[in-house]
Amino acid sequence: MERALLPVPAGTPDDGSVTRLLSALEAALEGTGPALAPGRPRFEAEGDRAGDADGGATRAGHVTVPGEVAVVLRTSGSTGDPRDVMIDAAALHASARATHARLGGPGRWVLALPTDHVAGVQVLVRSLDAGRAPVVVRPGRFDPAALASAVARAAADGAPVHTALVPTQLHRVVEAAGDALTGDLAPLLDLTSVLVGGAGTPAPLLDRAHALGLPVITTYGMTETAGGCVYDGTPLDGVSVRTEPDGRVLLAGPVLARGVLGRPELDARLFVEHDGRRWLRTTDVGEMTHGALRVLGRADDVIVTGGVNVAPAAVEDVITALAGVRGACVVGVPDPEWGRSVVAVVVPAGAAPSLDQVRDAVRRRLGPAAAPRHLVLVDALPERGPGKTDRAGAARLAAHRLAVGPEGLSAP
């Protein structure tokens, strides 16, 4: 049995729009209303793929989905390939309940994320699961003081207060706080948990946040897992993690999405069977240590330089721990000698470290092959979504800058 899919135009969340969306989402989860496609103002028959009952169907400009599907979210991940991910009500509920179990119980959620991304949708689902309406951060550019004000309103009823942020937002909070959460930011100390995901969070940023007293929990997951499903390296209840011999991360459990709307060929690549279970074959590589997952980065991001594999995320961890670094993205650019050269694209904070200092730090931790051969300084890293660095954009920027040969770049 199928039901209609209702496009929901994107917009800056405010109290009114979130109240309406929350009501429609509740009906979608209960099966009494259409499934929702947040962030999609309309569907066009020519642009949307048709398929079978498990892949969506376009009929006279209307899109239908299997009856169990509650939400369809458009995502391109890091690939740039747009896809509409169908998530069943059961998967959304499983994720919300496992999150509350990990956090010690439900509470009041503060919405600081867009509602056309899975992390924002999950704040709404968790709010419905908790039976408490979310408190919405004031619309506009993210402001730590506005977040603190929303937390103060949420804490008024005495329930635990949770929120979810991307690393960029957490960075702005930490920068605004300085040495302590005081004044307008003092209410942030009332937070019970701060889930941070959507991109890797640099270790120095986590250290600063914890030093301020923020109860930050890093999350790993994606739209295809109904949001974060691994918290601080540990899978949520019901979620299983394994790695393939090449390090590719696989995830299983009740949080898995049904599939991609109208793309059965993509489903066949994303979802695989192992030991009688359905697994999502992610685009990430990682390692398991004593049951904890450490994500090393995207499989496609691994840089092969001189025949040696270099994981950019590991290099970025070293670089962002250096004084004078606000952010970093490590990419590979074509090199006639090495195949690919490791390049550090860095956002400085004050006096940036030199290329030699960056190379020495990385060499000591990860070996000579991982040491960047070029350092490119930028005002900001390109982004492809909330808090997510656009690695392809950073690689293009680095290749352009190196071709121009700006002063200060050198290849040791």
Image (tube, helix red, strand yellow):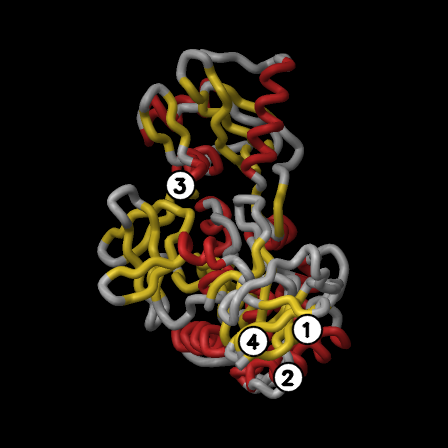
Residue 156: quadrant of the picture: bottom right
Q: Residue at x 54, y 37 (%)?
A: 391
- Residue 6's label in the rendered image is 1
Q: Quadrant of residue 146?
A: bottom right
Q: What kind of element bears circle 4?
A: strand
Residue of label 4: 70
Q: Nearer the viewer, mark 1 or mark 3?
A: 1
**Residue 89 horizontal/vertical position (percent):** 51, 78
- Report whether residue 79 is seen: yes
Marks 4, 3: nearer the viewer: 4
- Residue type, numbered disc 4: Ala
Q: Where is residue 272 shown, x and y percent of the image?
A: 34, 58
Relative to 408, 265 lies left or right: left
- What amino acid type is highlighted by mark number 3? Ala
Residue 316 at x, y = what percent? 45, 36
Q: CA distance from mark 1 to mark 3?
A: 35 Å
Q: Which residue is mark 3?
A: 299
Which residue in the structure is indicated by mark 2? Answer: 33
Q: Disc 2 or 1, which lies upstream in sequence?
A: 1
Q: Residues within 10 Å of mark 2 (few under 14, many from 20)?
A: some
Residue at x-position 65% and y-position 51%:
176
- Mark toward the viewer: 3 or 2: 2
